[in-house]
Every structure is written in C-alpha cells, then in structure tokens.
C-alpha cells in the first residue's frame, strides 16, 4: 500500500501549499476572531493505553467530509486497540494551532489533523514536539524534509478518477460525458486526467467535456456549469470540486442525467441515503478511503511500525481508493460493466495498468497513457 515516490515528488516543493482535498474540504477564508472549538471526550480507557486525538478541519465529525471519515478511522482504531480517543471540531481556521496545542498540553501520544489548510500548523507542532506522532490527512510533505514523527496521508486520485471515467463512458447513451472540477491543483488534476483517460480506455470515441472552476465553495456555479454540459448533450457528470462539484451533481441528477460523486459516498451524504431528489441517478462515487488510511496509521503506531518523515500513499493495491456502491442506480450498471470495472481495478492494483497520470503532480504522462481496451456490452 505504501510506496515511496521520493524522486517523483521532489517537484512538489513549489506546490505543497496548494494540495487540497477536492471533495470533503473547502477553502473557506480565515476568520480574524477565533471561535471556541467543540471538544468531545470518549469513555476513559485503561490508564496505560495510548492516547489519540483528532483535530478536524472546519466542520464536524458527522459532516460527510474527510472530517467524518478520519473520525471513523480513529474511532475504529481506538475501539479495537483500547485507546483513549478525543476530538476537537474546529470552528475557524484561526483555531488550528490552538486546537493542536490543546492536545499537546494534555499529553496525547498521537494527534491526527484533517485537511491541507492545517498542514503548516501540523508540521510546526511536529517539529516542536518530537515525542508525539502527527498524522496529517490529505497533507503532502516531501519525503526526507520533515521530522520522523510526522506523516502525510496521500491518495491515488488518478486511479479513482480512471474508474469513474470508465464507468461514465460505459453507461453514457449520448456518447458525451463531463467533469466539473474545482481549482487546478494536483489532486483535482489527478481526478480529471484519470477520468478522461479511463473513459477513453473503454470507449475511444467518447466525447469529453471538462472545466476547472476557480473555487471549491460555489454550488451555484457548479450547478450552472453542469447544466451547460447537459445542454451540450452530456448525460453523465462527474463532480470533483467540493461543494462546487456537489452543486453540479445535484443539479444534473435533478435534470435526469447520471452523476458520479467524489471522495466519499455521495449517495449517503449529498443525496441523504436516497431521500434527496435525483438519488436514483448517482451511479457511484470515486472515493478516497480516509477511514482506512487513518486506521492503518494508528495501527502502525500501536504495533511499532510507524514510519514518518514523508507521506503514506494509499492506492488501489491497498484498497485506499475505488468506487462506492451503485445503490439505486445498480440496474443501470450491467454485469458486463461490473466485470470490466473489476478487471480495471485488479490491473490498477497489480500495476499492469497505468493511468497515464503523474501520481504526484497530476500532469499527463503522454507516453504512459494506456492503449484503449474497448468495452463490449
């Protein structure tokens, strides 16, 4: 699951501040006046157990974003290994450092922080407190450039996007599909280029529409962009841009187009487990298993196998990325389509299929774009 990309990732020194989760995290502007964070305490475990803590990005541990899935992974680890676990729900970006410091002062052994916006505060705290393990969700640190007690959890968005593109192309009746993407930063580029390459892999003549939008937090802009794509004959829309992408797939689904969510299972979150309009039109979601990643890193600490000073990369080989359930749209995904997706996932996992996308920068690698392997219904 964990792979080293030292040489390949060196170029990211210039773009580290831009790395972001394109689904669960939103680039809200900092607040000048800090708000009181919400701190929650779990039942007391045995006195000699490790103590783990989580500091969310803006939001709560039940908000359907990376916050929730990081919490689930930490909670699972705490239950299985008998650990004390507490979390703070961050109310404002100005609170990041203070929230981390709260758990430092209280003597916690492991501190998990969520999102790229808190990365600087996490790195500074790790450098100042080498006795504490820090785990940063969706945070990038060039291997060898940080302290041994710090690891950033990264994901192969290009592989998840490749699967989403293959699914969209196979289901499309019009032969035109689209992606409404957020800002043009590495995780989003990986999703978009993976999506395009996956679509062409199974359907070389597919017509691809796509656009990067300047914000992750404008659902109305996402909706209007998706509606324009539908007017241009797109009948499957992939939203990869936080609330902007969510706005796109909600609007598209309500207009009868098929949609694909991102990061977490948006049938559960955006479409309220089937209760929201258009829930029958979400085919799946290109997911990043943040819960698996957090659980595995805490487990590594417990078992004494933790490795810091860089990143832990989660990919298809370790079930770190993939597609969510088809839910109410299952009848639209034929057994032949499912078999093709299974074939693609297995090939991505064993390394016999390359997405043609740089797993660090998200740029296309032309010579590595796979030859098409058309789907036969």
Image (cartoon, rainbow, N blue to C red):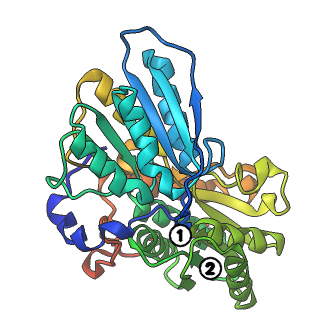
Q: Which mark is residue 190?
A: none
The answer to whether residue 131 is visible is yes
| Distance CA(mark 2)–CA(mark 1) | 9 Å
The answer to whether residue 138 is visible is no
Q: Position of residue 18 (x, y in %)?
A: 38, 70
Describe the element under mark 2 as helix, strand or loop. Answer: strand
**Is 27 on the left or on the right of 301, as rendered?**
right
Q: Residue at x 41, y 42 (%)?
A: 100
User: Would you name the residue on which mark 2 appears?
Assistant: 177
Query: Which residue occupies the foreground of this view, 195 or 87?
Result: 87
User: Marks 2 and 1: CB-CB under 8 Å?
Assistant: yes
Label 1 CA crowd tier, 10 Å (few <14, some 14–19, many 20+): many
Q: Position of residue 125 (x, y in %)?
A: 30, 45
> Farthest bottom residue?
232
Q: Quadrant of residue 234?
A: bottom right
Q: Residue at x 62, y 79 (%)?
A: 177
- Say how many tags the image has: 2
Describe the element under mark 1 as helix, strand or loop. Answer: helix
Q: Quadrant of the N terminus?
A: top left
Q: Say above or below: 135 vs 370.
A: above
Q: Quadrant of the C terminus?
A: bottom right
Q: Say above or below: 57 vs 232.
A: above
Q: Residue at x 44, y 19 (%)?
A: 83
Q: Which mark is residue 165?
A: 1
Q: Position of residue 74 (x, y in %)?
A: 48, 32
Label 2 CA crowd tier, 10 Å (few <14, some 14–19, many 20+): many
Q: Residue at x 55, y 46 (%)?
A: 67
């Amino acid at each position: 699951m964990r792979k080293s990309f030292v040489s390949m990732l060196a170029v990211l020194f210039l773009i580290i501040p831009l790395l972001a989760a394109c689904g669960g995290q939103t680039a809200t502007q900092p607040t000048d006046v800090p708000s009181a964070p919400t701190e929650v305490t779990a039942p007391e475990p045995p006195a000699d157990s490790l103590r783990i803590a989580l500091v969310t990005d803006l939001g709560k541990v039940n908000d359907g974003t990376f916050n929730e899935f990081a919490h689930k992974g930490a909670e699972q680890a705490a239950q299985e290994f008998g650990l004390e676990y507490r979390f703070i729900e961050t109310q404002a970006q100005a609170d990041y450092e203070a929230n981390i410091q709260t758990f430092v002062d209280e003597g916690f052994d492991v501190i998990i922080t969520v999102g790229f916006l808190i990365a600087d505060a996490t790195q500074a705290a790790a450098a100042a407190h080498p006795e504490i393990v820090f785990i940063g969700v969706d945070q990038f640190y060039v291997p060898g450039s940080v302290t041994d007690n710090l690891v950033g959890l990264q994901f192969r968005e290009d592989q998840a996007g490749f699967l989403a593109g293959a699914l969209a192309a196979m289901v499309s009746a019009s032969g035109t599909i689209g992606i409404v993407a957020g800002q043009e930063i590495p995780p989003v580029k990986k999703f978009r280029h993976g999506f395009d390459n996956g679509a062409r892999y199974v359907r070389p003549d597919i017509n691809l529409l796509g656009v990067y939008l300047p914000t992750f937090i404008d659902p109305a802009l996402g909706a209007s962009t998706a509606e324009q794509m539908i007017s241009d004959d797109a009948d499957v829309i992939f939203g990869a841009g936080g609330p902007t992408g969510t706005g796109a797939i909600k609007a598209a689904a309500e207009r009868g187009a098929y949609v694909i969510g991102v990061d977490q299972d948006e049938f559960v979150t955006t479409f309220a487990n089937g209760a929201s309009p258009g829930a029958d039109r979400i085919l799946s979601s290109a997911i990043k298993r943040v819960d698996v990643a957090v659980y595995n890193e805490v487990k590594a600490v417990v078992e004494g196998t933790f490795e810091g000073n860089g990143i832990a990369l989660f990919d298809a080989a370790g079930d770190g990325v993939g597609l969510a359930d088809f839910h109410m749209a299952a009848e639209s995904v034929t057994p032949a389509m499912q078999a093709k997706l299974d074939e693609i996932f297995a090939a991505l996992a064993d390394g016999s299929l390359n997405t043609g996308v740089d797993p660090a920068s998200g740029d296309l690698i032309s010579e590595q774009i796979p030859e098409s392997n058309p789907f036969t219904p």
